[in-house]
Amino acid sequence: MTKVISKFENLPNELLLDIFTYCRPRDLFTSLFNLNRRLNILINLQPLGVDLGNALPKYLLDIHYQSVLSYAREQIISLRLSDTYNRMKRFVANDEDLGIDFETRKAILQRVRCLILWDPTMNSLYDTLQYANNLESFHLTSIGRARETPNYSHSLLKILFQMKTLKRLYLALHDSIIYDNGIDINTSITHLILNGCHMQHFGSLLRHLPNIQTLNIMCYNRPNLFSWTQENFDHTLYDGLSERILHLTNLTLQVTHTPFFEIEILLRQLPKLIKFSFSSLLIEDYSNGANWERVITSSLPVLKKFSLFINETHVPMRILIDLEKMIQSFSSFFWDRWPVVIEYYNEGSSKRHVMLYTLPMQKDSVRTYLYGVQTYPTQNSDNTYDLVPNEEKKNDYKKVYELHFVLHPSPPANVLLPNRAYTNLKSLSFTSELTDSGSYDSDAILIDLQKLFSSSTLANIKRIYLYKQVYPTNFFSKLLNILPNVQSVRISDALLHISTVAPRITSLTIDFTSTVVSNVTDILRQMGTYLPNLRYLYLELKDAQNIYIFLAYCLRKLQHLLDIHLTFHDANACIDQQTFLSWFTDYKALNALNSKVQVEFNDKNNRLHISL
């Protein structure tokens, strides 16, 4: 065999460009930029996506400002910003302390094609959009700012619909958008995801999007807001849509408190749908298979894929649930294409829950009960379902990413959910409504979980979330025994009882906001003893009372820690920035922590982030 020694700089340009796609911007500009002129030329041709969000440690954020963004300002096509700790606010302000001048930051926003914003304030949002005027894709997620600013989305659509290059729009807001009749007609948007729109505005919104192809939208009416009946319904809300909306082939529609006849009127105007997914929180009308069969047959002639998910968690007692009639309505040959499953949980007058869905299930997160659910396949009885090939069964629930179980003190029957193939299940979460930890036996639950899931499925679980306070004795520690590869845990302080080393857990969220008084010292001891590889720590606190105890211990004992996030939930709880920074500076000096260890605060000083 001939031994050939090759040099990096002798590689062809095409291969180098391919290598650079796997490099982070800071690697390109701090490690490779000055290697030689040829590499510099190739680096300057490389399109870049830059993430300045919360996942980026503060010291690396500073490196981006000092060594990356100025050089890469003409190459950045995708940018992610977050306002949780005021990073976005500072990015769009004339702040001379950032290490990059304001004109360069504005130039980056003007050139960027994809902009992703996380939890911005209203002012930061509009300051950013005044410069980002060449967007092709815009993604906005608000996780709570809208609670503080009711006019959060005022004029937002008006600004976005004026963008002539915008093609993809994603708006995940806390509340419905504030619809403005003065918005322009936008002919460039082809894909829209919107999680809040009043149903009476839906038709008008569609008329302003004549080239929309794919739409995922949540529309709602508040209960009893309108007393629409089929006789007095305003048909002009949807009249003429079929002549205006010529390209919409993929629709995902979620509704609340909307009568079925209105959905039927809407679908008559959308005959070109090829894929249609529908969800509702109300079981009335929507649980009648004959209604859906009539609408699809008469109004959607080219439909190929249909998904139905009806989930009413608290069915009012005034509503009669006739399961036999419901099952029969979905038993015609028409439904062989989209078999339906009905799940029913009944605790008498206190709780009735009905979930109806087509297979394969399209939801990635499902809330259900470990015990007491009655399952009714409309096409196959439990016996004939066993005859269905395993490969087909694998597809039925492959999109389910998370299962959320509710534990009730007195389920109607000790019947376990059917055994199903959850091939992509990664997360298990539990909500306990127990008042007595002796209501269930931990060992019995674990045995039943092992019946419900295969060993390979349990081995794939990466996240556990436990909500509320009262669980069977030692439930969490025993749960870890059957879930060997869990990496992320969210748990209440009162439930954290670990007795064996869990080396795979790298992320831990502890909720200290309950009224139960916990042993802080014991919790810290458990983290230091049994979680040796903890990297990400999130503490949900009522106030700032014990933060110095927490931080002094965690910074000293948790050797692999990369991030600490603290949040104070009491209304007036906050931390004095100057006092904390004085303590933090002294602590770093006394414990020889390097300059990479930095702290950030949010605008109300009730959240802080320490990156190590």
Image (cartoon, rainbow, N blue to C red):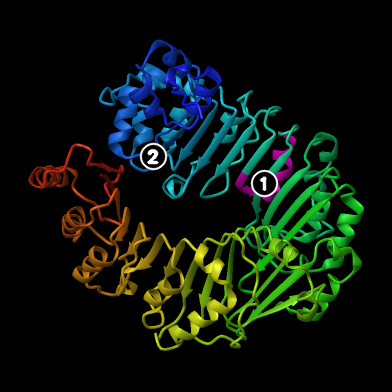
Query: What residue does disc 2 label?
Result: 83
Kindly indicate the quadrant of the structure image that contains residue 380: bottom right
State the image coordinates of residue 147 (x, y, percent, origin top left).
44, 50
Identify the residue at horizontal 77%, vertical 45% (top origin): 237
The crowd level at tag 1 (other Cα within 10 Å; few <14, some 14-19, many 20+) is some
State the image coordinates of residue 569 (x, y, percent, origin top left).
32, 58
**Farthest residue, direction front:** 1
Q: Is residue 377 above or below residue 582?
A: below
At label 2, the amino acid type is: Asp
State the image coordinates of residue 252 (x, y, percent, origin top left).
70, 50
Identify the residue at horizontal 37%, vertical 75% (top origin): 477
Q: Quadrant of the C terminus?
A: top left
Q: Is residue 292 left or right of residue 466?
A: right
Q: Real-space Cα distance between discs 2 and 1?
A: 26 Å
- Nearer to me, 234 or 246: 246
Q: Which mark is residue 216?
A: 1
State the image coordinates of residue 131 (x, y, percent, origin top left).
47, 22
- Nearer to me, 130 or 28: 28
Identify the residue at horizontal 86%, vertical 72% (top origin): 331
Lower sequence index among marks 2 and 1: 2
Identify the residue at horizontal 83%, vertical 67% (top origin): 289
- Identify the secondary structure beneath mark 1: strand
Q: Which mark is residue 470?
A: none
- Identify the secondary structure beneath mark 2: loop
Q: Is residue 484 above or below residue 198?
A: below
Range drawn in magenta:
194-208
